[in-house]
Amino acid sequence: MLMPHCERCGCNLHAVGAREFERSRTPQSPIHARIGPRGGRAAVFALGAVLLFAMARAGFVAGGAPIALAAVGLAALLAAPLLASVLDGRRR
């Protein structure tokens, strides 16, 4: 039975070919390389701000300020996992 890690450096062994492994390590889209992590975070925050504004506007039109507040709260609740993943990526 094979060891689950390399004996030289301790890295995990992968059950794929070397070419396929190298291809999987490269970014999937060329735009990712141009934007970079800082631009990606900015895009996520801008998208979140637009989402909150749109939910507040729709809620205000539908039922006034209380419904707008509830809509913003719902949008924030649904966007929390996305925000957490972005903040987690910033710590690394």
Image (cartoon, rainbow, N blue to C red):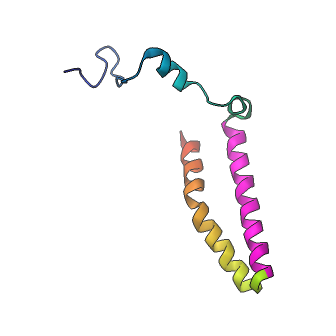
Q: Up-down: is 64 above or below 8? A: below
Residue at the image point whose x is 34% and y is 23% from the top: 13
Q: Position of residue 50 (x, y in %)?
A: 76, 60
Instruction: Name the foreground residue: 8 vs 23.
Output: 23
* Left/right of residue 88 with respect to residue 3 in the rendered view: right
Q: Nearer the viewer, residue 17 or 46?
A: 17
Q: Which of the pair 44/22 is nearer the observer?
A: 22
Query: Is 41 a magenta residue?
Result: yes
Residue at the image position 72 percent from the left and 62 percent from the top: 51
Q: Residue at x 48, y 20 (%)?
A: 20
Taking the magenta stretch, the answer to whether it contains residue 74 is no
> Hey, which quadrant is residue 54 in on the image?
bottom right
Q: Is residue 68 above or below residue 14?
A: below
On-image quarter of the N terminus: top left
Above or below, 27 against 57 in this view is above
Which residue appears farthest toward the left when viewing the image? 1
Q: Is residue 73 left or right of residue 65?
A: left
Q: How many marks?
A: 0
Residues in magenta, as a range: 37-61
Chief SS of the magenta region: helix
Report whether 84 appears left or right of 71: left
Res 30 → quadrant: top right
Residue 38 placed where, x, y %?
A: 69, 40
The residue that appears at 69% across and 50% down in the rendered structure is 44
Q: Position of residue 58 (x, y in %)?
A: 77, 74
